[in-house]
Amino acid sequence: MITGLSPQDTTLIDHHGFSIRLSPNGLDWMALVEWPDRQPTLIMAPERETALAKAREWIDRQLATDESPQ
């Protein structure tokens, strides 16, 4: 867990089974993307909606990579 964040400052959003935790961090927004059995990924952006959009794009790329034939 990222220190310095209070639960009331964090928004939890689900996107295709991934958890996205959105929270303000000074002048930026952080999106912490978590999925079982994987290392969390941190995405930062100046606006909340941009951080959320980037997190969703990252998740969609991960799912497309996992589904591609080997």
Image: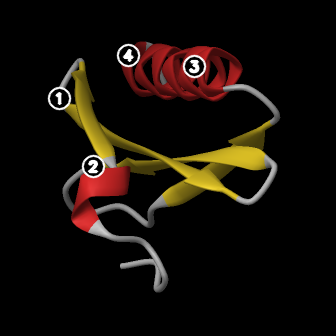
Label 1 vs label 3, nearer the camera: 1
Disc 1 versus disc 3: distance between alpha carbons? 14 Å
Q: Secondary structure at mark 2?
A: loop
Measured as percent of width and height from the top left, residue 19 is found at: 26, 40
Disc 2 versus disc 3: distance between alpha carbons? 14 Å
Q: Which mark is residue 61?
A: 3
The residue to which callout 1 is attached is 17
Q: Secondary structure at mark 3?
A: helix
Residue at 60 percent across and 14 percent down: it is: 53
For mark 3, does the 10 Å Cα neighbourhood hold few (<14), some (14 to 19), or many (20 or more) residues? Answer: few
Disc 4 versus disc 1: distance between alpha carbons? 15 Å
Q: Which mark is residue 67?
A: 4
Instruction: Tell me which amino acid carries mark 3.
Output: Arg
The residue to which callout 2 is attached is 35
Disc nearer the start of the sequence (4/1): 1
Q: Nearer the viewer, residue 52 or 35?
A: 52
Q: Nearer the viewer, residue 6 or 22?
A: 6
Disc nearer the start of the sequence (4/3): 3
Instruction: Tell me which amino acid carries mark 2.
Output: Trp
Q: Is residue 18 above or below residue 68?
A: below
For mark 2, does the 10 Å Cα neighbourhood hold few (<14), some (14 to 19), or many (20 or more) residues? Answer: some
Disc 2 versus disc 1: distance between alpha carbons? 7 Å
Disc nearer the start of the sequence (1/3): 1
Disc 4 versus disc 3: distance between alpha carbons? 10 Å
